[in-house]
Amino acid sequence: MTIDIDHTSLSVSDYAKAKAFYAAALAPLGCGLQMEFPMDDGSRVMGIGLPGKPFLWISGGGKTSPPVHIALRAENRGQVNAFYAAAIAAGGTDNGAPGPRPHYHEHYYAAFVLDPDGHNIEAVVHSPDMPAKPARKRAAAKRSAAKTAKRPAKSATAKKPARKAAKKPAAKRKPAAKKGRKGRKK
């Protein structure tokens, strides 16, 4: 059994500012505003996440301290770098530029940004980036795929032509044994 956190929430002091910050900062991770609605007390709440699944709920007008730390998993180092650049451009404060953090583990690569209320938002990837295939190999793979696509598909019922058995000349063949009355060889 595995346990995953389904969603979490945090309060912000300026809802409109937080909405703009999170929309921009989390876009490189494929996240966006999924839901937004008013609460009974007049404040607003938004759900941010992947399409169809909000996992980060942000509400305005609540307690903002102590600040929280939320780490979001990225797919690769490029997404971590893009998150950091977008978050800083959206008004975040640097709390750790993108880079390896080998004290956590060998492939830990992360960036940390403080949101406008001081919450520590992190983007992290736990696996090494796979090196890009050289252009020559990519081009060869495309050509191979194109050739394969042009070939007609082999039918499952198609049979290979039967090989004709080589016949020995009559002089080299052994004569068939003669059978007696009860099927015995003589």
Image (cartoon, rainbow, N blue to C red):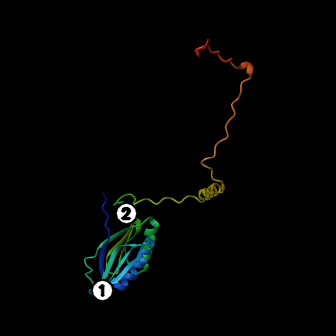
Q: Quadrant of residue 5?
A: bottom left
Front one among 186 and 94: 186
Front one among 125 and 4: 4
158 above or below 183? Answer: below
Helix, strand or loop for disc 2: loop
Q: Which residue in the rendered view is the most extreme toward the bottom?
A: 42
Q: Quadrant of residue 73?
A: bottom left
Q: Position of residue 160 (x, y in %)?
A: 65, 42
Helix, strand or loop for disc 1: loop
- Residue 43 numbered mark, or none: 1
Give the quarter of the figure containing the N terminus: bottom left
Q: Position of residue 76 (x, y in %)?
A: 45, 64
Give the quarter of the figure containing the C terminus: top right
Q: Which residue was labeled with disc 2?
A: 101
Q: Position of residue 176 (x, y in %)?
A: 66, 18
Q: Which residue in the rendered view is the most extreme toward the top?
A: 186
